[in-house]
């Protein structure tokens, strides 16, 4: 069995704090320092006062809830903290500052490669930034990072900076988006030949040892398929929801269905915010009103209907999308284009759904 943050938090919603009648998750008493290492679970419960008459009973109930609703064999370590006045707060950023109730973590996934997942992730991040949100973008495709090219950041090499007593990685920042990628640490022509644990550890560092600051949305460009990288992300982050990208082609749809199944697995249970049909049709620049369905028509739309999921949008195959990505200028930077409007609409829809 594999443990995930959402599984633990769902279990903790069964624990009520007698002082307010709310469950401890809803009351904001579960600290942001939830950590999972195999079957070991550790976190803090923040009580409103010191001493607190309900402290022992709540800690005991929280431990029992995890054993009952998450995993009987889990090794649970719960520490206790107390709510501080603003005057007592420090600037220690040793914990990842995004992991709070405000930041929405959205995984952009695909069942197979080549369907434009990174294009959707990059343009979604830019669209959210254009809508005025604070956005982070993590390129989690360890073995085939595309984001450095799409943002013209292939020469960027992250530096470290001291924050309190900790040295943190400084993400790149472009067009209002904070960005990190394994591609920043390897040469573009160099293959990343790593075993799974090494890749997972590197990815964890980009998440937990970077100075992301306060964000509203954190977009993850995940690798294609279902792999241990996905498990690492689910164990490290509490993911708000997933967006599945596919072309309407039958081969791609079969793999997209597997991607949906991964997130909907009983042990994972991450909400699917919806599906995006990329390369829905081809429109030549000289014939802007024409649509040629070269990969099939409405395949993702039909898949969404069959699974009872939302179709978030249909993105056409337009030459300028490819050119803008290769030039490091996401097409959403030019809001006058129909494709940019499609991405802005997608971003606006997700701000409503990712709550």
Image (tube, helix red, strand yellow):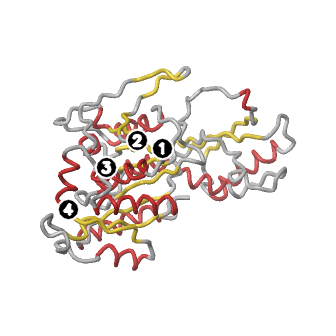
Looking at this view, is 71 or 207 the one in front?
207
Q: CA distance from mark 1 to mark 4?
A: 28 Å
Q: CA distance from mark 3 to mark 2?
A: 11 Å
Q: CA distance from mark 1 to mark 2?
A: 7 Å
Q: CA distance from mark 1 to mark 3?
A: 16 Å
Q: Residues within 10 Å of mark 3 (few under 14, many from 20)?
A: some
What element does badge 2 sit on? loop
Q: Earlier in the sequence, mark 3 or mark 2?
A: 2
Query: Cβ–Cβ below 8 Å for labels 1 and 2?
Result: yes
Residue highlighted by disc 4: 318
Q: Residues within 10 Å of mark 1 (few under 14, many from 20)?
A: some
Name the side, left or right, on which 324 lies relative to 107. left
Query: Cβ–Cβ below 8 Å for labels 4 and 2?
Result: no
What element does badge 4 sit on? loop
Residue 9 drawn at (x, y percent):
62, 53
Residue highlighted by disc 1: 134
Q: Earlier in the sequence, mark 1 or mark 3?
A: 1
Q: Quadrant of the C terminus?
A: bottom right
Residue 25 drawn at (x, y percent):
68, 51
Residue highlighted by disc 2: 176
Residue found 40% across the figure and 39% down from its top: 178
- Which of the two discs, 1 and 3, sits closer to the camera? 3
* Residue 268 to residue 77: above or below: below
Q: Earlier in the sequence, mark 1 or mark 4?
A: 1
Residue highlighted by disc 3: 333
What element does badge 1 sit on? loop
Q: CA distance from mark 4 to mark 2?
A: 25 Å
């Amino acid at each position: 069995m594999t443990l995930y943050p959402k599984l633990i938090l769902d279990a903790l919603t069964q624990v009520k704090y007698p002082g307010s009648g709310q469950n401890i998750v809803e009351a904001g008493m579960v600290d942001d320092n939830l950590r999972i290492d195999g079957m070991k679970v550790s976190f803090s419960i923040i009580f409103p006062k010191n001493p607190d008459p309900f402290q022992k009973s709540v800690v005991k109930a929280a431990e029992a809830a995890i054993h009952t609703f998450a995993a009987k064999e889990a090794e649970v370590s719960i520490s206790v903290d107390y709510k501080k006045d603003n005057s007592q707060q420090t600037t220690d950023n040793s914990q990842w500052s995004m992991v709070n109730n405000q930041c929405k973590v959205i995984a952009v996934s695909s069942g197979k490669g080549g369907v434009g997942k990174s294009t959707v992730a990059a343009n979604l991040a830019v669209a959210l930034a254009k809508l005025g949100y604070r956005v982070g973008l993590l390129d989690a495709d360890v073995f085939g990072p595309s984001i450095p090219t799409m943002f013209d950041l292939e020469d960027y090499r992250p530096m470290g900076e001291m924050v309190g007593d900790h040295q943190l990685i400084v993400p790149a920042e472009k067009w209002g988006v904070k960005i990190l990628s394994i591609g920043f640490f390897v040469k573009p022509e160099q293959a990343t030949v790593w075993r799974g644990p090494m890749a997972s550890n590197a990815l964890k560092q980009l998440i937990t040892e970077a100075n992301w600051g306060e964000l509203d949305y954190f977009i993850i460009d995940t690798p294609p398929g279902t792999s241990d990288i996905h498990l690492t992300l689910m164990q490290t982050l509490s993911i708000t929801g997933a967006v599945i990208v596919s072309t309407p082609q039958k081969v791609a749809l079969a793999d997209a269905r597997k991607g949906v199944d991964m997130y909907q697995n009983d042990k994972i249970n991450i909400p699917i915010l919806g599906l995006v049909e990329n390369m829905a049709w081809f429109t030549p620049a000289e014939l802007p009103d024409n649509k040629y369905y070269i990969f099939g028509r409405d395949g993702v739309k039909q898949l969404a209907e069959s699974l009872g999921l939302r179709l978030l949008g249909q993105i056409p195959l337009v030459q300028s999308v490819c050119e803008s990505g290769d030039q490091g200028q996401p097409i959403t930077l030019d809001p006058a284009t129909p494709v940019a409007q499609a991405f802005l609409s997608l971003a606006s829809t997700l701000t409503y759904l990712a709550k």
